[in-house]
Image (tube, helix red, strand yellow):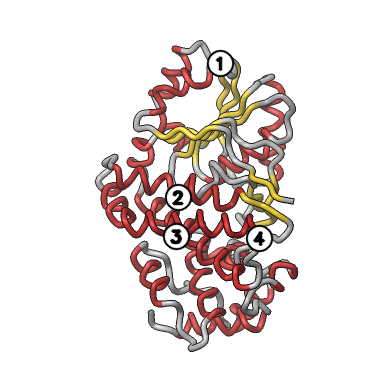
Amino acid sequence: MFAIKSPQTYYHQPGLCARVGELLHKQATNIAIITSPQAWKAVNPQLENSLHAAGIRWQTNFLTTECTDAAIMTNLACVRRQNATLVLGIGGGRVLDCSKAIASQLADVALVTLPTVAATCAAWSPVSIIYNECGGHLRSQPLSLMPLMVLIDSEVIARSDARYLRAGIVDALAKWYEFRPYQQKNDDSLALNLKVQAARLAVEIFEKYGEQAVKDNERQEVTPALMKTIDANIAVAGMANSMRDDTPAPGVAHAIHNRLTHQPELHGWLHGEKVGFGLLVQSLLESHDGQPEAELLALLRRYGSPLVLPDIGDNRAEALAVIAREVKFPAKGAMRLPFSVAAENIEHALLAVDKATF
């Protein structure tokens, strides 16, 4: 089995919020918007004006919690009562994941995503990430419905905190470091090779444009470097996640991230920041000399990824051991890796990171 799950159309243009009504009116005239108060403010008044001009009716549903099963069901009921024929998700990862999960449970309802930050590839990705009420990762839920459109307004993203862009770069970089090791044992997998090629393209974009894009974002300027980096964070990283076959390649850094989401002390870290720490741990799992890969370490520093955990309890060594034991990684994936992801190995890597002075 080989499958590619991707959005039908990807639009990226400065000022695109002013065209949303024009782009949607042929698809629906009654839409449900899932967003957050901050994201809604970021796209308006341009988006509201465009919907008015196109004669589109809408109802705004604000997500103020994590993307939980309860939040999905609550907003799903609202969309059903509205009889909307299109769900428009506007915001960051949790809003977009909630929107995707809702639309996947509705027949004859289209889905459009509009990210307001470039911190993840959630606008494109073929899964929704479901959390508990405290922000702890529960599962990755495959989607039955992919977006009809992904709409990117680089003016909106340029106005967001550059920390989101940096975290998105690290999250996208992770695809390369996570997928590449599988080629040592699975080099005949078409899906894997396509994943690796897409992930490598993102790395090359960051090598050329990443640092400049962050500077431009800090100045809130839309530039070619920023636009290319946004595309790499969302579309190219999304493509790397879109190819599937019978030989799955789960990411080690993301598995470590998933466990870290259950640490209350890390709830202030962005997704990509936790993934970056996971990459550092993965690099030590792969290492033959007890040192992380120099190029990776330089990239993590460049994009501000945290390299040390905060205070996680009175007995730090025991807390790290618990984290290691509770990292969940599928056995079929572990068998295809050229290094061990056993709990004791993860514990040793966590302890090594904790004692290092990077």
Is residue 123 rendered to the left or right of residue 160? Answer: right
Sooner in the amino-acid sequence: mark 2 or mark 1: 1
Give the Cα separation between the discs numbered 4 and 1: 40 Å
CA gap between label 4 and label 2 equals 24 Å
Give the residue number, with chain letter if any, for mark 4: 189
Reply above or below: 5 against 34.
Answer: below
| Quadrant, the C terminus | bottom left
Q: Nearer the viewer, mark 3 or mark 1?
A: 1
Badge 2 is on which residue?
Answer: 233
Q: Secondary structure at mark 1?
A: loop
Residue that label 3 marks:
170
In whole angstroms, how far apart are the C-alphas of marks 4 and 3?
25 Å
Residue 1 horizontal/vertical position (percent): 75, 51
Q: Tag count in the figure? A: 4
The nearer-to-camera label among 4 and 2 is 4
Q: Amino acid at mark 4?
A: Ser
Quick check: 119 left or right of 238? left
Mark 2 belongs to which amino acid? Asn
Q: Earlier in the sequence, mark 3 or mark 1?
A: 1
Q: Is residue 345 above or below residue 251?
A: below
Q: Which residue is at a point 30% across and 43% down the rendered structure image?
A: 224
- Tell me which label, 4 or 2, sits earlier in the chain: 4
Q: Which amino acid does the dot numbered 3 rest on?
A: Val
Quarter of the image holding residue 157? top left
- From the image, tell me which residue sits under label 1: 26
Q: Disc 1 residue type?
A: Lys
Do residues under tags 3 and 1 come within 8 Å of each other at their CB atoms?
Answer: no
Marks 4 and 3, the one that precedes in the sequence: 3
Choose between 341 and 157: the one closer to the eye.
341
The x and y percentages for residue 88 are: 56, 29
Location of residue 186 (image quadrant): bottom right
Image quadrant where residue 154 sits? top left
